[in-house]
């Protein structure tokens, strides 16, 4: 089966970069990325590539070559579905905020809407690929919706979860550790669909890195991968607190255990806690599925990863308050970094939001600087928590486009994202601009403690 047209529903952090790379390596296939959000599609089509809706190193280069050639961004969802033989669903699957499973289960309404729309529009056979992260057995629901749409065409469902990490997405897509494709290899149509997707990835991914499994293993592998990654962060963070009490150093402990080849050195940096749109949501989802199946011990085991992450964030904010003589009321604090990690403009579930919220509750005045997150996004993030009114929030938030403006008269600087540029700042100059004693709370352990203490800072790191 030769695919000539691909449609991807959802032009977000996954759909945009993933389809750009597929288009880059398959110039003979027309790839159309569609979205309900007109503003987002306009930004993807913006002549000025600096206005692309997401920031990801290396993205501009790939989009500039493929866009208009075989890569297109459009709001014409139905048109793209009609003409494509393969449709990726890459819409958001946030945690439910209502009804059964509120605060735990994945909200699949966007995925279901896509499936219903595909079922209604399709006039020829389609391969539907789950790119969104979905609970185990979602493919069954999608299949049922499509089959009952009455279009009379055949649908094959594949699961192809995305393992890219924001900030390194283009590298992860160019040389993936593995590509996972779940499908039904018990039928001829199923086998053909799997092969069609394997062929697309084979344009640039070595065959041995393309793994095929059954659909449910594929769906569960994605949740498991995120749960394991987040678990490592919570594990090291739990020990950072123990280090602070005992005089051991978490950096030294991380190094010592990371050199054990059975453990490995990645994902062992203690920090203010993980954020991002995926880790928390996917673990909550895993916990919810386990509980629904009566597997309470399994559910509680994974739930602790989240408990520890929330604790780490709270503890960081409380430590700032404690060190600033137990009150931050009316004190100005510079927040460096709002994105949930470096090299992305994504702030979803960022630790910075929660730390800032706690500080605002204590009436601190925050001067926030991030190299890539827009001020409107920061204001949205704080208001979204609904802790207090927008009017009230406004009184405590100053968003700065220059880091040196953020530190003028500040009592403390809190580092909440590990942006490389923070390491290169003139910290002597910053010290001179701040109130004394001048505090640094390094939530990412990226700054040079000895250098800062020599300048005169009161430097606090994690662990
Ligand atoms: N962000 C990541 O790093 C990452 C990594 C791997 C997997 N995932 C998974 O990929 C999925 C997408 O994540 P994302 O970060 O790209 O989300 P996102 O919010 O950035 O993008 C989703 C897009 O889908 C659009 N959309 C929603 N419903 C639609 C509909 N019915 N029709 C057309 N467009 C619709 C939204 O407007 C939005 O632009 C999620 O399931 C997520 O868990 C994300």
Image (cartoon, rainbow, N blue to C red):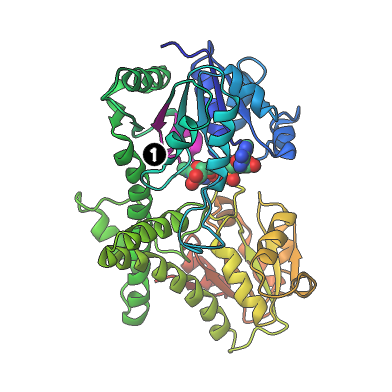
Q: Quadrant of residue 207?
A: top left
Which corner quadrant holds the N terminus?
A: top left
- Mark 1 = which residue? 140
Residue 166 is inside the magenta segment: yes
Q: Residue at x 74, y 33 (%)?
A: 42
Which image quarter holds the C terminus?
A: bottom left
State whether residue 46 appears in this view. yes
Q: How many marks?
A: 1
- 419 lies above or below 148: below
Asked if residue 263 lies left or right of residue 278, the reply is left
Q: Residue at x 45, y 64 (%)?
A: 271
Percent position (x, y) of residue 417?
A: 55, 58
Where in the figure is residue 108, as x and y percent of width and height? 51, 48
Residue drawn where x is 43% and y is 67% of the image: 309
Vertical comparison of 217 with 440: above or below: above
Does residue 307 appear to the left or right of 239 in the view shown? right
Identify whether 110 is placed above or below 446: above
405 vs 348, left or right, is right
In depth, the one of 439 and 453 nearer the eye is 439
Where does the image place residue 292, in percent across and percent down from the top left?
A: 35, 60
Q: Residue at x 36, y 61 (%)?
A: 287
- Percent x, y of residue 345: 62, 48
Q: Quarter for ligand 1?
A: top right
Q: Magenta includes 357?
A: no
Nearest the viewer among 310 and 247 is: 310
User: What element does badge 1 sit on?
Assistant: helix
Q: Is residue 165 visible?
A: no
Mark 1 CB lies closer than 8 A to ligand 1: no
- Locate residue 370: give its quadrant: bottom right
Question: What segment is highlighted magenta in the picture?
Answer: 156-173
């Amino acid at each position: 089966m030769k695919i000539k047209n691909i449609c991807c529903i959802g032009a977000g952090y996954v759909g945009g970069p993933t389809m750009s790379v597929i288009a880059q390596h398959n110039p003979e296939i027309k790839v159309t990325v569609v979205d309900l959000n007109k503003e987002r599609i306009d930004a993807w089509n913006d002549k000025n590539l600096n206005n692309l809706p997401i920031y990801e190193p290396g993205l501009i280069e790939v989009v500039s070559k493929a866009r208009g050639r075989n890569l297109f961004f459009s709001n014409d969802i139905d048109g793209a579905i009609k003409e494509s033989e393969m449709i990726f669903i890459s819409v958001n699957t946030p945690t439910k905020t209502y009804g059964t499973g509120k605060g735990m289960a994945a909200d699949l309404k966007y995925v279901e809407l896509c499936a219903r729309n595909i079922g209604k529009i399709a006039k020829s056979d389609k391969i539907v690929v789950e790119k969104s992260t979905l609970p185990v057995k979602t493919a069954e629901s999608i299949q049922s919706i499509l089959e009952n749409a009455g279009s009379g065409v055949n649908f094959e469902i594949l699961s192809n979860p995305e393992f890219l990490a924001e900030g390194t997405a283009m590298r992860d897509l160019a040389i993936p550790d593995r590509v996972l494709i779940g499908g039904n290899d018990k039928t001829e149509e199923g086998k053909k669909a799997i092969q069609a997707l394997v062929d697309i990835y084979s344009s640039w991914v070595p065959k041995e890195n393309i793994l095929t499994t059954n659909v449910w293993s594929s769906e569960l592998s994605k949740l498991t991968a995120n749960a394991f990654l987040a678990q490592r962060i919570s594990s090291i963070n739990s020990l950072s607190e123990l280090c602070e009490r005992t005089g051991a150093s978490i950096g030294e402990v991380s190094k010592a255990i990371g050199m054990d080849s059975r453990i490995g050195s990645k994902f062992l940096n203690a920090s203010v806690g993980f954020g991002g749109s995926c880790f928390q949501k996917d673990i909550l989802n895993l916990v919810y599925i386990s509980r629904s199946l009566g597997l309470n011990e399994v559910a509680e085991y994974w739930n602790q990863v989240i408990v520890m992450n929330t604790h780490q964030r709270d503890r960081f904010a409380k430590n700032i308050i404690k060190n600033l003589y137990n009150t931050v009321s009316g004190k100005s604090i510079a927040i460096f970094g709002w994105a949930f990690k470096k090299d992305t403009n994504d702030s979803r579930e960022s630790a910075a939001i929660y730390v800032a919220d706690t500080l605002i509750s204590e009436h601190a005045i925050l001067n926030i600087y991030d190299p890539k997150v827009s001020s409107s996004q920061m204001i949205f993030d704080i208001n979204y928590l609904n802790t207090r009114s927008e009017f009230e929030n406004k009184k405590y938030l100053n968003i700065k486009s220059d880091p040196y403006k953020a530190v003028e008269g500040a009592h403390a600087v809190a580092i909440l994202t590990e942006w490389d540029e923070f390491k290169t700042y003139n910290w002597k100059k910053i010290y001179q601009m701040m109130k004394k004693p001048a505090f640094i709370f390094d939530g990412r352990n990226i700054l040079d403690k000895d250098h800062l203490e020599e300048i005169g800072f009161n430097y606090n790191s994690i662990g």
